[in-house]
């Protein structure tokens, strides 16, 4: 179903994604330059605060430069979290923010979920490329970086599935938006954003790893910094969950779509 949607509406998807990305910086002096400046400023702030002020060190040395190690590890965590949070927080209002599209019978509303994920992925991938360049400058690249698509693509599919669920339910449950904002704030601390997985007590790790965000962050750190190939078990698990969410998301969205116009 997703492949068919892509093939039939590729141009429309490109137009909406481009509009979403450009709309964030419309009217600003730097424009798309903010996509590069923002992660650079974040990385500089992390280095200053975590190493300069708190003198924190990551338990496992990754880059060989203590002053950057903690900052880069946290940067990966926040990159993944912000990517996830942007899609999830926007999901409940994807349809309600554009009621004029609901009345257009020929418009594929489910395309908005794909556009939302691609727009969020644009900033995330810019940050990821910047991170890889800095890491390559400090310690050189790893052959395992070639496996990054195996980690990122299932996660993107998972995000589309979540977005479809939230977009459909958000039309009927207006409290879903504030609830998801609260849930993502809590999830930041229940994911290994500011700490490694090894800090989680062993008896809790199995439950902890049910969080897809925790799986993504740990896999990214292993691939980027430790020269480790992605875990086949983890990638397969993410793929299965993504397929279930995507399939069920399409089903729920199409089931509820008929009532969108009446509610809005």
Image: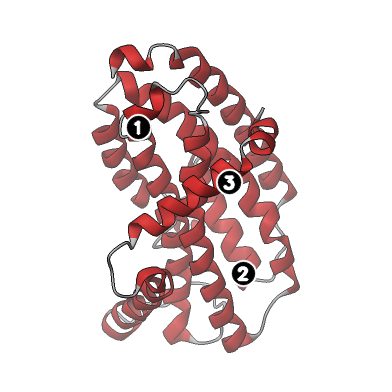
Distance from Cα at disc 2 to Cα at disc 1: 33 Å
60 is higher (above) or lower (below) than 149: below
Quarter of the image with the C terminus in it: top left
257 is higher (above) or lower (below) than 64: above
Circle 1 Cα neighbour tier, 10 Å, few/some/many (<14 / 14–19 / ≥20): many
Residue 177 appears at what percent x and percent y?
Answer: 28, 33
Describe residue 231's horizontal placement relative to residue 215 as left or right. Answer: right
* First-in-chain label (2 vs 1): 1
In this figure, which residue is indicated by the disc labeled 1?
92
In this figure, which residue is indicated by the disc labeled 2?
224
Describe residue 233's horizontal placement relative to residue 252 as left or right. Answer: right
Which quadrant holds residue 25?
A: bottom left
Residue 173 appears at what percent x and percent y?
Answer: 29, 21
Distance from Cα at disc 2 to Cα at disc 3: 16 Å
Quarter of the image with the N terminus in it: top right
Numbered badge on residue 155: 3
Q: Residue at x 29, y 15 (%)?
A: 263
Q: Is residue 205 visible?
A: no
Query: Judging from the image, what secondary structure is the residue with disc 2 in?
Result: helix
Query: Judging from the image, what secondary structure is the residue with disc 3 in?
Result: helix
Q: Which residue is drawn at 69% across and 35% down?
A: 3
Query: Judging from the image, what secondary structure is the residue with disc 1 in?
Result: helix
Describe residue 180's horizontal placement relative to residue 129 as left or right. Answer: left
Q: Can residue 258 be seen in this view?
A: yes
197 is higher (above) or lower (below) than 72: above
Distance from Cα at disc 1 to Cα at disc 3: 19 Å
């Amino acid at each position: 179903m997703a492949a068919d949607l892509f093939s039939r509406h590729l141009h429309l998807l490109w137009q909406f994604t481009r509009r979403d990305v450009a709309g964030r910086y419309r009217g600003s002096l730097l424009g798309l330059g903010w996509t590069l400046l923002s992660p650079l400023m974040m990385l500089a702030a992390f280095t200053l605060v975590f190493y300069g002020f708190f003198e924190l060190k990551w338990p496992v040395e990754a880059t060989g430069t203590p002053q950057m190690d903690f900052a880069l590890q946290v940067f990966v965590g926040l990159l993944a979290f912000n990517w996830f949070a942007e899609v999830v927080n926007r999901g409940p209002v994807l349809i309600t923010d554009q009621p004029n599209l609901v009345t257009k019978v020929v418009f594929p509303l489910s395309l908005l979920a794909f556009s939302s994920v691609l727009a969020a992925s644009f900033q995330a991938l810019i940050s990821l490329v910047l991170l890889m360049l800095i890491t390559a400058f400090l310690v050189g690249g790893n052959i395992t970086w070639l496996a990054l698509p195996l980690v990122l693509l299932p996660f993107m599919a998972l995000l589309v599935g979540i977005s479809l669920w939230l977009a459909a339910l958000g039309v009927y449950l207006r409290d879903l938006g504030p609830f998801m904002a609260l849930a993502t704030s809590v999830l930041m601390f229940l994911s290994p954003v500011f700490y490694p997985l090894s800090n989680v007590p062993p008896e809790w790790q199995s439950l902890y790893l049910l969080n897809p965000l925790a799986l993504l962050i740990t896999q990214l750190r292993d691939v980027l910094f430790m020269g480790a190939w992605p875990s086949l078990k983890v990638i397969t698990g993410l793929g299965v969950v993504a397929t279930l969410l995507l399939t069920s998301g399409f089903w729920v969205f199409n089931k509820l779509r008929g009532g969108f116009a009446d509610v809005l």
